[in-house]
Amino acid sequence: KAGVTQTPRYLIKTRGQQVTLSCSPISGHRSVSWYQQTPGQGLQFLFEYFSETQRNKGNFPGRFSGRQFSNSRSEMNVSTLELGDSALYLCASSPGFGGGGTDTQYFGPGTRLTVL
Amino acid sequence: AQKITQTQPGMFVQEKEAVTLDCTYDTSDQSYGLFWYKQPSSGEMIFLIYQGYYDEQNATEGRYSLNFQKARKSANLVISASQLGDSAMYFCAMRELLSNTGNQFYFGTGTSLTVIP
């Protein structure tokens, strides 16, 4: 099975712009979660989508949004970029049904966003 | 309160030796899962091993084993016969199965492991 793919891998934007990141989960997985990783804050949960519905959301401002399509692919959008949004954005997929080990999250390579 | 605590920011180990990376967790959920991930400098998070709260035996996956002590709420990762390719950041994570948090994982701050030749 192909793994989780994320595009683009690298992105440079300027303050005030918006950005859209894409994630394609492992075939058959219906849950997609997004995390932001920075040196100062570590790994922080952004949101999770399951069957096109947001199932949970982390403590991020409304500038961060996401969606999931019927084929389970997911996008996240950040509007009005700030310098502090520079981070590695990781997407993780899992089956999304059960508990425990059956819902192990498998991560993509990440998108490294730099805001100038 | 932190859900996952990793108290070792950096660790060094000699090649071919074993090393233990510490992880303690905090949850009031009666049902949870514990995970370890490896993150090389490339950035991708690689799943290593899983331990369910209900597992009486410690999980093992090749050179990785998890020293699970439920009463102490600890889930330490043991890497045996360290290899140079084991040099990376290691993250402990938890999923609470009964709370209304979907599939949210809580991560620790990580431990940077360096394997010395």
Image (tube, coloured by chain):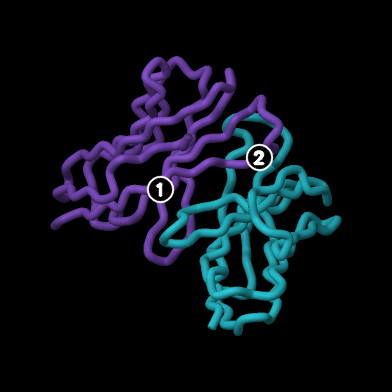
Q: Secondary structure at mark 1?
A: loop
Amino acid, disc 1: Thr
> Any mark on residue A18, and which?
none
Q: Which chain is cyan?
A: A
x and y percent of residue B15 in the render? 16, 50
User: Disc 1 sits on a residue from what chain?
Assistant: B
As displayed, is residue B43 above or below residue A57? Answer: below
Label 1 crowd (10 A; few <14 / some 14-19 / many >=20):
many
Check residue B109 in the rendering and tell me which mark sits there, or answer none: 1
Secondary structure, mark 2, is loop
A45 shown above or below A21: above
In the depicted view, which residue is nearer to us: A95 or B30? Answer: B30
Left or right: residue B73 compared with residue B27: left
Answer with the quarter of the image where residue A98 lies: top right
Give the percent coordinates (x, y) of residue A3: 60, 57
Image position, residue A76 (x, y; %): 71, 64
Q: Nearer the viewer, residue A8 or A58?
A: A58
Chain B drawing hue: purple
Please name the residue shown 17% across and 46% down the image. B16
Please determine if labels 2 and 1 lie on a single subunit: yes
Q: Is residue B36 above or below residue B29?
A: below
Disc on the earlier residue, 2 or 1? 2
Q: Residue at x 69, y 61 (%)?
A: A24
Task: Tell me the mark number nearer the camera, choosing from 2 and 1.
Answer: 1
Mark 2 Cα shell of 10 Å, populated few (<14), some (14-19), many (≥20): many
- Relative depth, front residue between A40 and B18: A40
Q: Report the side of B116 relative to B99 (left or right).
A: left
Q: Which residue has dot 2 on it?
A: B103
Q: Chain of mark 2?
A: B
